[in-house]
Amino acid sequence: MDELRELFQQMLDQDLIQIILSNTRDASRGTKVKIRPVMLRGELYFQETLYRETKVFHSNYPKEQMLDHMAGCFRQAQMGNGVWEVTVLVSKKGKISIKRRRRPDADIPERKSAGLSHNRPKQYILQEGQPVDFLVELGVQTRDGKVVKSKYDKFRQINRYLEFIRDILDKLPAHRRIRIVDFGCGKSYLTFAMYYYLHQLQGREIQVTGLDLKADVIRRCSELAEKLGYTGLEFQEGDISSFWGTDQVDMVVSLHACDKATDYALEKAVKWGAGVIMAVPCCQHELNSQMQCELLQPVLKYGVIRERMAALITDALRADLLEKSGYDTQILEFIDMEHTPKNLMIRAVKTKGMRPKSGVPEGEKEFRADRLMEFLHVNPTLKELL
């Protein structure tokens, strides 16, 4: 495998576009991996996107750790950088076949200079240097399209959010108006981004309602939507738990709704039969106050550990309850941990059956979740609502 490691050693640099590993040797490890370069705190890392069953996991590794992590897990690789496209096949007997093809545009000076730079622009959905009306009005971009330095993390977050929407685009109605409700919309950076992407860039007919408790925020968002001519985007002041302003919703969004507010948003989505749910929970206090477990007491006695465990268990149980309600559910990293610990997104897509198959008998899987709740002495709000 020295030949293969040497190839990966050459390809893993800032000029890498992407590596795709497939044809796994071990399905429990994952079925496919995508690798791309990222800059974190001024250092070059490689982001692994690992696909395992219906779940997707994101991790960042320095080069040498990435090399060790890739070793021997897959029999096929497709990779490319600014100059080469490479295909690797490994037979069951371990014979390695490597085919290289020079990129047709490898000699273009602009590509060479961009590829050699640690700061080469990422191919975002909303591009740097191209002004977008709502980004300018919200202070993320200047009039000529430059990203304001202090808002660059917000710019990345907006694009990451749009990538999540792009992934489920085919799950939304194609031949009628798409109805979307955004609970706890706040200042609505992402609400405006969602409208712009679906309506302006994808040409979909949509009606979006943003809901929030703060009257001044709703007023400002309404004024901006009117100024931009976003006729399919409206904002209302109100509480999630008491909102039933429509009979049919195709997509429910809940970003950073605090504590139980996320549960009420998920309840609404399930009872509407929304085809897509995207929730980024925040301030998961409920289980923190409920958890009682003698066996885990040596861990739970530390406040910060207890808080993080409660948050993770809360969101895992929410995802499980959505699966029981007929959704194919993923928990995804929304933005890098270096920016905020509140970085997990629950993304759920309605399935035709009541629950996606996972290889675990239905009754046994439900029993496991109930047993966990009994073990921790917790009773999540979403369980009661559904």
Image (spheres, rainbow, N blue to C red):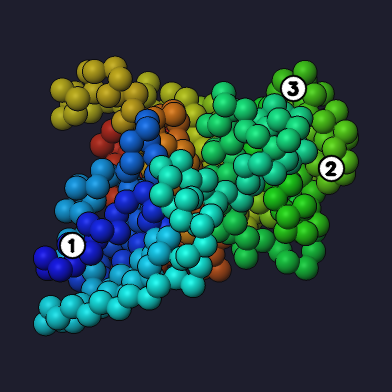
Quadrant in which the N terminus is drawn: bottom left
First reached walking from the N terminus: tag 3 or tag 1: 1
Contact (Cβ within 8 Å) of mark 2 with mark 3: no
* Mark 1 vs 2, N-terminal side: 1
Q: Position of residue 84 (x, y in %)?
A: 38, 68
How crowded is the residue under tag 2: few (<14 C-alpha within 10 Å), some, or many (20+)?
Answer: some
First along the sequence among labels 2 and 3: 3
- SS at mark 2 in the image: loop
Q: Position of residue 140 (x, y in %)?
A: 66, 30
Q: Quadrant of residue 92?
A: bottom left
Residue depth check, mark 3 versus mark 1: number of the one nearer the observer: 1
Residue 316 vs residue 152: left or right?
left
Name the side, left or right, on which 134 lies relative to 322. Answer: right
| Mark 1, secondary structure of its residue | helix
For the residues carrying marks 1 and 2, which lies nearer the camera in this image?
Answer: 1
- Residue type for callout 2: Tyr
Q: Which residue is mark 3?
A: 217
Return the residue at label 1.
6
Give the Cα distance between marks 3 and 1. Answer: 55 Å
Badge 3 density bin: few <14, some 14–19, many ≥20, Cα 10 Å = some
Q: Are marks 3 and 1 in contact (CB under 8 Å)?
A: no
- Look at the image and tell me whether residue 321 can be seen: no
* SS at badge 3: helix
Residue depicted at x 59% and y 40%: 158
Q: Amino acid at mark 1?
A: Glu
**Which residue carries the number 2 mark?**
230
| Residue 10 in the image: above or below residue 374 | below
Q: Position of residue 369 (x, y in %)?
A: 33, 47
Residue 362 sits in quarter: bottom left
Distance from the alpha carbon under mark 2 to that under mark 3: 17 Å
